Image (cartoon, rainbow, N blue to C red):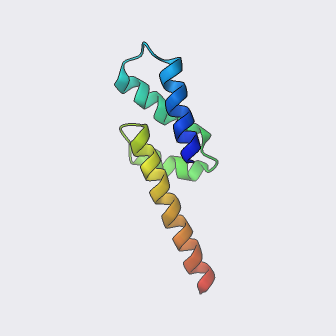
């Protein structure tokens, strides 16, 4: 997921140099959500309305850790 974040950050900067920074961040965030393998995760992140790519990435990491913890608890019981 980190490499996707970095790749999208780089590609957005290179592909959209004339676009205002804030709009480029929104577009990059949308691209990031599109490439996530889990549509439910993408929806949960979208519901939080992240302001930029970094916020979306942090939310994705946090939700992924919580999901893994929940799965471990379910397996233990």
Quadrant of the image containing the C terminus: bottom right
In this rendered view, identify the residue nearer to me: 21 or 75.
21
Task: Give the vertical position of 9 relative to 50 (above or below).
Answer: above
Tell me where residue 19 appears, x and y as whole percent.
Answer: 41, 16
* x, y percent for residue 7: 57, 34
Q: Is residue 3 above or below residue 25?
A: below
Choose top left, top right, bottom left or bottom right for residue 17.
top left
**Which quarter of the picture shows residue 20?**
top left
Q: Answer with left or right where residue 38 lies relative to residue 61.
A: right
Q: Residue at x 63, y 80 (%)?
A: 75
Looking at the picture, how far across and down is residue 42, in whole percent?
53, 47
Relative to 51, say whether 37 is above or below.
below
Whether residue 54 sits left or right of residue 5 in the image: it is left
Percent coordinates x, y for residue 29 in the rendering: 47, 36
Which residue occupies the extreme top position in the image?
A: 18
Count of numbered circles in the view: 0
Q: Tell me where residue 62 sits by quadrant.
A: bottom left
Left or right, 51 with reference to 71:
left
Residue drawn at 44 percent across, 44 percent down: 56
65 in relation to 35, above or below: below
């Amino acid at each position: 997921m980190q490499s996707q974040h970095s790749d999208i950050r780089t590609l957005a900067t290179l592909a959209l140099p004339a676009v205002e920074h804030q709009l480029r961040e929104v577009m990059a965030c949308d691209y990031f959500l599109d490439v996530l393998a889990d549509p439910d995760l993408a929806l949960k992140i979208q519901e939080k309305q992240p302001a930029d790519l970094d916020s979306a990435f942090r939310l994705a990491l946090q939700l992924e850790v919580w999901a893994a913890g929940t799965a471990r608890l379910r397996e233990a019981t």
